[in-house]
């Protein structure tokens, strides 16, 4: 099984940003599962920017 799975099944909220292939000339785009797309936008599926603050809010794990 490819992609990301939760205990309750798959999720369409899983979007990869900035993904690239390490091997020259390799393109696995066609092998991706439909619920794990790659985005060229720096935002989550609900339109929020991808940042530490988006995911952690005001919680500071380094305090």
Image: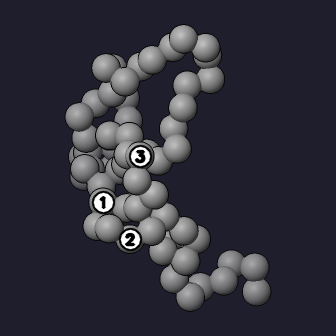
The reply to whether dot 1 and dot 2 touch (C-beta < 8 Å) is no
Q: Say what secondary structure mark 1 lies in.
A: loop
Task: Name which residue lies at 40% across and 53% down.
Answer: 41
Task: Report the front residue among 63 and 20.
Answer: 20
Q: Is residue 38 left or right of residue 56?
A: left
Q: Earlier in the sequence, mark 3 or mark 1?
A: 3
Task: Name which residue lies at 62% across and 23% down.
Answer: 22
Q: Is residue 53 left or right of residue 2?
A: right
Q: CA distance from mark 3 to mark 1?
A: 12 Å
Judge whether residue 4 can be spotted in this image: no
Q: Select label 3 or label 1 by which is in front.
A: 3
Task: Name which residue lies at 68% across and 78% down.
Answer: 61
Q: Label 1 belongs to which residue?
A: 45
Q: Label 2 belongs to which residue?
A: 48
Task: Name which residue lies at 30% across and 60% down.
Answer: 45
Rendered location of residue 1, percent (x, y): 34, 27
The reply to whether dot 3 and dot 1 touch (C-beta < 8 Å) is no
Judge whether residue 42 can be spotted in this image: yes
Rendered location of residue 60, percent (x, y): 66, 83
Q: CA distance from mark 1 to mark 2?
A: 7 Å
Rendered location of residue 30, percent (x, y): 31, 20
Q: Say what secondary structure mark 2 lies in.
A: loop
Q: CA distance from mark 3 to mark 2?
A: 14 Å
Depicted 56 relative to depicted 42: above or below: below
Q: Label 3 belongs to which residue?
A: 40
């Amino acid at each position: 099984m490819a992609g990301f799975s939760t205990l309750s099944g798959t999720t369409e909220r899983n979007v990869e940003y900035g993904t690239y292939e390490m091997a020259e000339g390799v393109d696995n785009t066609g092998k991706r599962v439909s619920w794990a797309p790659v985005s060229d936008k720096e935002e989550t599926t609900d339109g929020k920017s991808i940042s530490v603050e988006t995911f952690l809010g005001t919680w500071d794990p380094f305090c």
